[in-house]
Image: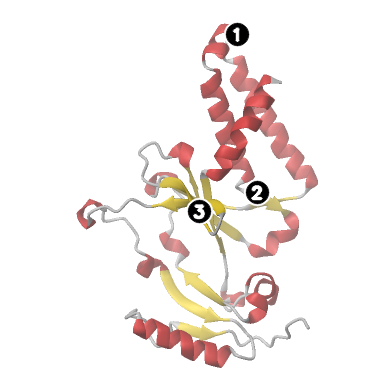
Amino acid sequence: KRIHHSFMMNARRDIDSSFVFCLSQVDGNHEEGKLSMWRAYGADGKGCALKFDGSKLSPQPDNQFPISTVIVKYLNKSKCSDEAQKLASYLINTISKYDIKDFETNFAGFMSLLNMKIGDICLSIKNSGFSEEREVRLIYRRGYDTDKKFMPVSKNFGGDVSVKLNVPIRPYTEYGLNDTALEDLLTGIIVGPSPNSWSITKALAQALREAKFNASDDFITRCMTPYRAPN
């Protein structure tokens, strides 16, 4: 009961200090994106998709810590139960390592560990009905950011308070050679398959020129898949 109460008290704080950037893997058969994805996430074909070079995102957490790269696992009901069983076993095994006095002394540390473990699982799974998305997530969690490379702060936007992630400004010389700039990750933009895709492509190209973004002629492409938007 005490563990449950402590978890519920800290769950909201943990959620507010976790940030997720979602991507979707594509292969040669779906380079322009699937129609179901355009309908669900691409403004019914009127939006755009950014293409990133996934090979430059390391699966090794230490290489871009405290941001981790996670390939989402898609679970049905029985597999979710398996994950819950694993978590329960982890909890029991962890508690069994302490005698009652040590457990009382280290209760706060134990709860912090438990919260992070549950969060790690929740942020890496999704219902199996979404499996075609092949989602990859870049995840930041403040509990792992002991050096405070990023600072979640609450900001008021039109009366609504939301938590944003601030990146401290550092001199260029402090960034290592392995830091990856957005220009190195972004390989192109796909314009959705709407009837207005040609005019959107022209407007987007003009915006990039005005922003002095150095892009090749084929940086912006149009999705040519025949598309019928919902009425």
> Which dot marks residue 100?
1
Q: Earlier in the sequence, mark 3 or mark 1?
A: 1
- For disc 1, the neighbor class at 10 Å (few under 14, some 14 to 19, many from 20) is few
Q: CA distance from mark 3 to mark 1?
A: 44 Å
Please identify the residue farthest to the left as the structure is shown: 173
- Residue 151 spot, x, y in % from top left: 41, 45
- Residue 225 spot, x, y in % from top left: 65, 85
Residue of label 3: 156
**Dividing the image into 4 quarters, which one contains the C terminus?**
bottom right
**Dividing the image into 4 quarters, which one contains the N terminus?**
top right
Q: Nearer the viewer, mark 3 or mark 1?
A: 3
Residue at the image position 32 percent from the left and 81 percent from the top: 212
Q: Earlier in the sequence, mark 2 or mark 3?
A: 2
Q: CA distance from mark 2 to mark 3?
A: 31 Å
Residue of label 2: 125
Foreground: 156 or 217?
156
Residue at the image position 64 percent from the left and 80 percent from the top: 45
Cβ atoms under marks 2 and 3 closer than 8 Å: no
Secondary structure beneath disc 2?
Answer: strand
Secondary structure beneath disc 3?
Answer: strand
**Amino acid beneath label 3:** Asn
- Residue 206 spot, x, y in % from top left: 41, 88
